Amino acid sequence: MKKTGKTKKLIALFAALALTLTALTSCSAVSDAFDFLYDALTNGGVRVLGDFNDLTYEKPDFDAIDNDIDELKSALAEGKKTKSYYIDRLSEIIGKYYYDALTMENLAFLRYCNDITDASLREEYYTLISESEKTAAKLEELYSVCAASEYKADFEEQCFGKGFLDSYSGDIIEYPPEYTALRGKEAALMSEYSAAMSELTVEYDGKTYTSADISAVEDEELYNRLVSAYYTKFNPTLAEIYVKLVGVRNEIAVMLGYGSCTDYSFDSYSREYSGDDLKAYFSGIKEHIVPLYRKISDDITSEGPLPFPYASPDRVKSLGKELAGKMSPKLGRIFGSMEKKHLVTVGSSDKMYYGSFQIYLNSCDSPYIFVNGEGSEYDVLTLMHEFGHFTSAYYNHGSTGGNDEAEVASSALELLALKYADGVFDSETAASIGKSGILSIISSLVECAAYSEFENLVYSDKALTAEKCNGYFRQVAEEYGISGGDGGYLYWVMVNHLFEYPYYVAGYSVSADVALQIYESCDGSIDPYLDFIKLARSGSFSDNIKTAGLESPFSEGRAEKAAAVIQKLTEKYFS
């Protein structure tokens, strides 16, 4: 997963800033040629990355940035300073926020992710989130003032990129105090959620079990009882937090002028499709892909747990590097540079954050990936997923397009890893990797579609309760053939995306279709994959799909074609 940023407009600004880093040119071919020449001369063809160990955490002073913003707004209103003064002050503010403060915010997040049981780290991170959102809102206000200024064209040329301020033209933006209060409330609820997630243990017959302990239980009857006890204990608490989050986010959406949280979220993720487009897309999934999903799920259930050898974090990284090198020598060099510059964390611990992600460290122009896995060779698949994000961010200097496009980069590389697994793993593990990879891509298509429909139900219910959430989830899970397992459909509260990034999961389903197309096009080489991810800075998601010679996921007949690819993979690995 790619950790998301702020609002759509601020995401667009960072895209503009990323382009500014490459000689203030809108021609990606020129910047790519420059990058290639520079890298070839200096670092064996690999872009020079910053070293994570050179970064030192210092708590960012968002209040100071807020004061700078207020001073510049006042100066622009008075109109008594020179053009160069305004440009210099604006550049300074942008640097302080995007390159300094947001990097420190991400470092605070990483510190917390390495030990989610540390309440002080959690409190500091979520306090920063609240302060950062307030500053982001003030920046939007400043940009609307810049858009109304006689120096608009100069600001765009020197600080943003041509056309950036057009969306701020019109009335001056002013966020009411209630908006900041709602953002603070949202951050407080997320802190409460994270605190609850750090304490997920259950007592049974005098023994304390963590989720990892439960997963390791071999006695099927005991395992089933523990799973039931686990979800029965935590569902009520987490569901109540979720209900409150839904309410706050609906209020935020309305305050920002959106008809629903759905519209607000889609806009934030720079999506070009609508809820109606998704409805038709999901209909195709139900008809053509759900039957395959049910069969694959049943086959894996009947076989029992897939065998994966234990693997230490170093072993996982070593296998990942070998796999990347077999896929492409350039990928292998990028992976090596990532390790050399300490831009990756791999672990397996209940104390670590409950998931995996990629973030971007703006101040050193480098991506960073975090993987909390299972402690087996299966974790190499998760690592390759996040390395797909890393690679896209590497090529595009952090400007990886909308979130759906970013998820294509990760899902496609994870899927392509299946083509090269035989040369890295033993035969039994390679077979398990293949089955897991198929399950992963079809789960993205099916389960994430179900989660998205679940979100439609909860965000449209003005009298939402925890009990209704459980009922809605059972409803959509049964429609998509998703098993309730021993948790009785209570386990949805463990899907962290639902809490952290509303409507993000829809992008997993959409991007999975494009990933399957890229997988099919990579016959003997992953160049089509690399060509696609390099397009992120040059056009919209839909335009880049066309440029790559692929079909829109929403085009007629796509579900049948995706099902055909999955069927071929199933015949290879499940025969």
Image (spheres, rainbow, N blue to C red):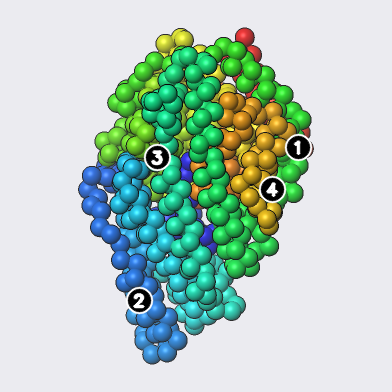
Q: On the rendered structure, is 70 left or right of 494?
A: left
- Location of residue 440 in the rendering, given as x and y in whole percent from the top left corner: 55, 28
Mark 1 near mark 3, Cβ–Cβ under 8 Å?
no
Q: Which mark is residue 82?
A: none
The residue identified by callout 4 is 457
**Which kind of residue does numbered mark 3 sit on?**
Glu
Under mark 2, the amino acid is Asn
- Foreground mark, 3 or 2? 3
Which residue is found at the position 37% from the left and 64% from the top? 97
Q: Label 2: which residue?
A: 67
Assess whether mark 2 and mark 3 are in contact (beta carbons under 8 angstroms).
Answer: no
Q: CA distance from mark 1 to mark 2?
A: 51 Å
In the image, residue 319 above or below residue 83: above
Secondary structure at badge 1 equals: helix
Quarter where residue 509 is shown: top right
Name which of mark 1 and mark 4 comes first in the sequence: 1
Residues tagged 1 and 4 counted as in contact (Cβ below 8 A): no
Q: CA distance from mark 1 to mark 4?
A: 16 Å
For mark 1, what is the residue?
283
1 or 4: mark nearer the eye: 4
Q: Earlier in the sequence, mark 2 or mark 4?
A: 2
Q: Residue furthest front?
A: 206
**Where residue 171 sits in the image (x, y, percent)?**
59, 79
**Disc 1 residue type?**
Ser
Q: CA distance from mark 3 to mark 2?
A: 39 Å
Looking at the rendering, in which quadrant would you find the C terminus? top right
Instruction: Decide: few, some or many residues near mark 1? Use Cα within 10 Å; few <14, some 14-19, many ≥20.
Output: few
